[in-house]
Structures are given as structure tokens and as C-alpha cells.
Image (spheres, grey):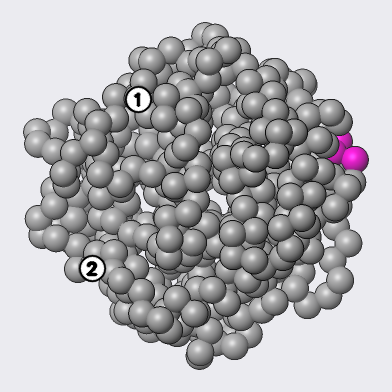
Amino acid sequence: MRKKNSFTDHLTRRDLLFQIGGLSLCGVLGQGKIFSLADAGGLSTAPQPSAAPGVLSPDDDAFLDELEKRNFQYFWEQATPQTGLVRDRCNVLKNDNSVVASIAATGFGLTALCIADKRNFIPAADARDRVLATLRFLWKKMPTHRGFFYHFADINSGERVWDSEVSSVDTAILLCGLLTCRRHFEGHSEISLLAFEIFNRVDWSWLSEDTSLLPHGWTPEVGFLPYRWDYYSEMMMIYLLGLGSLPHPLPADAWNAWKRTKFEYDGIRYIGSFAPLFVHQYSQAWFDFRGKRDQYADYFRNSILATDAHRLFCLELGKQFPNYSDDLWGISASDSQKGYVIWGGPPMMGPIDGTVVPSASAGSLPFITQPVMRVLRNIKDRYGRAWCRYGFVNAFNPLKDWYDTDTIGIDVGITMLMAENVRTGFVWNTFMKNQEAQRGMDRAGFKRYQP
């Protein structure tokens, strides 16, 4: 569980996954079936998922606009203007004076500033100045190792906190935000230069020196962490950014090193992991996989399948927890009444107790649009204590009348970015203008095709 005052309870979501039971990629858990890459055939699209991305109504668009405005308030108010670093989490019921920033939340925050500028949530000069202050701090003052950033840092000084690791995935999320800013503010020469310098400082060849399976992180005390990015998850962005680097690139075969294990639930077959739903969302907040595939899969289509399987999984759980329904589903790593929990499925992971995580469904807005819209509107309309200044609280459990008091930066971030992507594709379109993103996908073997 993730509490608020010790390093062991602030491990990365991925490290927590490795420390709980049931992570062996074999056997059968719950109702989900697992297949190895040796299984014949590709990903199944029959039977079809019950829903596909849909067109937003004017009311839907207005709702998402309000949601994005509230999401952006988190990144504007829960960051220090002098450093631009964004708090890992905050209590929405009181003035939160915590000093712990998340480098991943900062990456989401940089992208949020681009969206806010595009949508005139704040004056253009204010957005530009905050981006510039953030990049200056990241380049000149923020501690790094081989260009990689520590997972958690003091929001005012940038110094490492909780003995946290230099994190490969959290650095990747920061870099995605950085590259989005470079293209959105491309008329500003200092922003472009700082983004160029910070990205090119990252030494991907150091990360892959002894292995094609990249490590989760490194600490001064123990060196590289023992965990590796060895199977499908949110880590696709790490490999693609590393493949797109010019000064310190990953070898091209790194893309083929990790496993793509196939799961099946209720006739829907897809590449997945023993992990919560967010693993299908994070890389796709920036990288545009629509109409593209490598030699293994169409990952956008794969996320549609995985999300619909999760929706059906929650409907089946409704027999045990009657709050889960077609209007209320979504379980991903989140707070709970008993602390921070890694849970999800299929197959079932963690002590699921009826808790609902709004960002779990919201992060899949581009994948199964109308089913997600139905959930988000239902939460706002029927569960008022789950709606707050920053959009949705992190989690709530209507069966136990429990409502979180916190929001978490990365979950607010995936909600805001995917809301904008389903409305306009703005984040995808802006980020993919970067040569690093294009080069990474080219080197990984992605080709356009007609799904």
C-alpha cells in the first residue's frame, strides 16, 4: 500500500506490481486466459468489442471542457512557479503544504500548459513563462544522473526525497511533456533550445549497456534496480524515446526484447500484463498509434480491446459488488480506504472491494468513448463528493460511503490529456511533430496500414 511518509510506500507502481503475488506470466487467474507468444495466430478481433470510439455530442464536449479546466487548475496551483515542479498529490479539502513533487506529474503538467494555452484557460504569456521557468530549472538546477531524473523531488529545491530512484519511466513521461512544449511553443527559441538540450542529455546507451531489457531505475546506494521492463506495459514510451535519440540511442533490437503476452477475456483477445488498466493508456497519451502497427500488433486497437475486456470484467464483478455497472466501472492503481493499492483486471488483481477509480475509465476516453462518457457523467451527476476543484477525486467507494480526499497528479494528467485527445487529437498531433518521436517509431518498425 502507498502511504504518504515513507519511501517503501512510495515505490513506483511498477515496482509494487513486482512485489505482490501472482505476477508469474503463466497459469490462469480468475476468468482471464493467458497465452504465450508461441500461440498460433494474431490478436482476435472477433467477437468485436461492444463499443468503439464515438463522436462527442455538444453536451459531451462541454462536459470535457469543464473537466479539463478543473484538471488544469491542479497543474497550475499545485506547482511552484519558481521551479515548475508539480506536487505528487494534494488534499482537496484543505490547504496542502506538502513538498513532494513527482517528475512524472511535472511531465503531465508541461503538456497541460500546452492544452491550457491552446484553449485560452490562461493568458498565453503566463503559460509560456511557466514552461520557460520549468525548463530552466530542469536544465540548470534539477539533480540528474546521466540525464535521468529522480522520481520524487522537493518541490522548491528539486533535491531528491525519500531516497527515490532515478526513474526510467518517470523521466520518459517528463520528456514527453518537454517535447510537446517544444513543438507547441516552437516560435520561442529558448524553450526549443532547452527542450533540445534536456532531451539529448539523457544517456539511453547507459541504461542499456548490459541488457536490451531496460531497468526501472538506479540509485546511488545500490546501482541499477533488479526490475526490468520485460513485458508489455506503459514502458513503450521509454523504448520509443530511446530509439529516437540521436546522441545516445538504444539499439534497434531493444524493441523486440520485451514480451507481448496474450490474454483472453469473454472472447476478447489482446496483448496485456498482470497490471492495472493504466498500462494501456500512458504511452498512448502522447504517441499516436492510430492506423499504425509493428510486426506484432496495432497497439491502439489493442487498447480498445483491453479496455472493453476491463469493462466486461467490472460488469461481472457487479454480481459481488452491486455498484459496478455499465454506468460505473473502472479499477486501476489508486488510493483506497486502506491506503494505496495496486488492483485491476482481468484477471483479478488485488483486494477489489467496490472502489471506483475515475481516471481508469477517463484514461481510455479515445478507446471506447461513449461507454467512458457514460461513466464520467454518471459520477459527476450522482456522486457529488467524487467531484472536486480538480475534477474527480482519486477514488471512491459508494458501497462503503468512502470518498478520497486526495487527487494524484499523474491520474489528473492522464484524464486531461486523453480528454483533449478524444476531442481534437491535439496532444498526439503536437507531440508527433517531433523528429525523436517519428524516428523512434520508424526504428521500431511501425508502418501505416488500414485497420
Name the residue located 77 percent from the left edge and 55 percent from the top edge.
Answer: 125
Of 286 and 15, which appears nearest the observer?
286
Q: How crowded is mark 1: few (under 14 residues within 10 Å), some or many (20 or more)?
A: some
Q: In x, y percent, where is residue 37?
A: 21, 31
In the displayed structure image, the side of residue 35 where residue 135 appears, left or right: right
Q: In x, y percent, where is residue 163?
A: 79, 34
The disc label shown at residue 442, or none: 1
Q: In x, y percent, where is residue 353?
A: 48, 71
The disc label shown at residue 51, or none: 2
Residues rendered magenta in the picture: 157-161
Q: Is residue 70 visible?
A: yes
Does residue 211 sit above or below 109 in this rendering? above
Of 177 and 362, which appears nearest the observer?
177
Taking the view exactly as shown, the residue that stands out farthest to the bottom is 382
Predominant secondary structure in magenta? loop
- Secondary structure at badge 1 equals helix
Q: Earlier in the sequence, mark 2 or mark 1?
A: 2
Of 424 and 244, which appears nearest the observer?
424
Does residue 383 sit above or below 22 in this rendering? below
Q: Which of marks 2 and 1 is in front?
A: 1
Task: Please say whether residue 30 is one of the residues in the magenta stretch.
Answer: no
- Secondary structure at badge 2 equals loop
Marks 2,1: beta carbons within 8 A: no
* Count of all numbered marks drawn on residues in the image: 2
Q: What residue type is labelled 2?
A: Ala
Name the residue located 42 percent from the left edge and 24 percent from the top edge.
Answer: 439
Q: Is residue 275 visible?
A: no
Name the residue located 48 percent from the left edge and 64 percent from the top edge.
Answer: 419
